[in-house]
Image: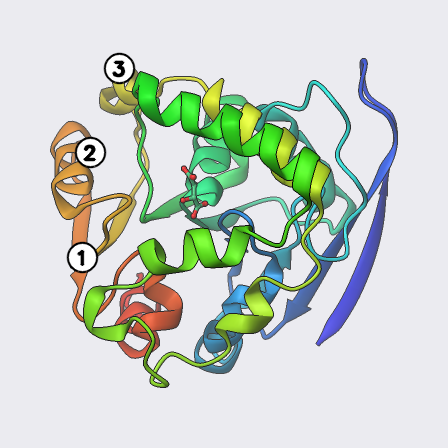
Amino acid sequence: MSEIKINLAPRGSKAAGEIHVKRVGSGPALMLVHGFPFSSGMWWNQVDGLADRFDLVIPDLRGFGQSSDLESGWEIRDFADDLARATQFLKIESLIYCGLSLGGYVGFELLSKYPELISKIVLCNTRASIDDQATARGRRLMAERVRREGTGFVKPTMLPRLLAKPNAGKVRVTGLDGLFEGLRAESIAQTQIAMANRRNFAPLLHSIDLPVTLIAGEGDAITPVTEMSGMAAGIEGAELHVVSNAGHLTPIENPEEFNQVLNGLS
Ligand code: MLT
């Protein structure tokens, strides 16, 4: 596996930064973009299961993993700009994009601004619509709390909602502790605010004209199957796969079924 550090020049009001990308395997380029508040480390089952078939490009979004810090005023589209520049640096002209939850929000921005870069998109455990008022308020409260108290409460607060009920607290899902290592308070705060302010892509779904695969977890309490099937209904030709025995973390909770979907992409 190559570990690549990419320096990003300043753009507009955004300062220079550094983004860390793992690259492994051979075949068509497949970018795997993590959820919140994780990092490239969440895809270990895909490194094992997909590198024979794909050139895996696995970034840490800015503010997470080994990438540099986020700055204030950060928006979801800024993550997409970073990824577009990273692919330029890596000389990748076209890729299959796969994003989970926050990674899906970033995928919509990337598709909107850099459509030529994406040949297919896989949206996992995510939504196109924006938050209701209570959710957006909860994000702002979390941003205030993490700035005040630090990151200690994040794992105990988030973990119970991430997993499908039968998995919660069981050893079957391994590696979860590592997911919450190295969290940065300011990244969490800035990203929550960015997610609360994200663009609504629900009205634009009908205009997506590339192959779309949607992956839902049958027990996902955060982005329920009904949300994902509503999204599938809005995108012409979209394929929806509902992964069994999985909640919000489909690639971790049921890697076999998750990888089968990706390995089956034509
Ligand atoms: C994620 O997994 O990225 C989060 O659930 C995204 C969100 O909070 O909307």
Foreground of the two, 150 or 214:
150
- Label 1: element kind: strand
- Label 2: element kind: helix
Q: Position of residue 108 (x, y in %)?
A: 43, 30
Would residue 185 appear left or right of 170 to someone viewing this image? right
Pointer 3: what residue?
203
Q: Earlier in the sequence, mark 2 or mark 3?
A: 3
Q: Earlier in the sequence, mark 2 or mark 1?
A: 2
Q: Earlier in the sequence, mark 3 or mark 1?
A: 3
Foreground of the two, 96 or 160:
160
Image quadrant, ligand 1: top left
Disc 3 + disc 1, Cβ < 8 Å = no
Q: Position of residue 232 (x, y in %)?
A: 17, 38
Q: Amino acid at mark 1?
A: His
Pointer 2: what residue?
231
Q: Cβ of disc 2 within 8 Å of ligand 1?
A: no
The residue sitting at 18% across, 48% down in the picture is: 239
Above or below: residue 144 compared with residue 66: above
- Label 3: element kind: helix
Q: Position of residue 221 (x, y in %)?
A: 23, 49
Q: CA distance from mark 2 to mark 1?
A: 12 Å
Foreground of the two, 261 or 171:
171
Residue 29 appears in the picture as rendered:
yes
Would residue 164 appear left or right of 255 to someone viewing this image? left
Q: Quadrant of residue 159?
A: bottom left
Q: CA distance from mark 2 to mark 3?
A: 10 Å
Pointer 1: what residue?
241
The residue sitting at 54% across, 31% down in the picture is: 192
Q: Position of residue 119 (x, y in %)?
A: 43, 44
The residue sitting at 44% across, 52% down in the picture is: 157
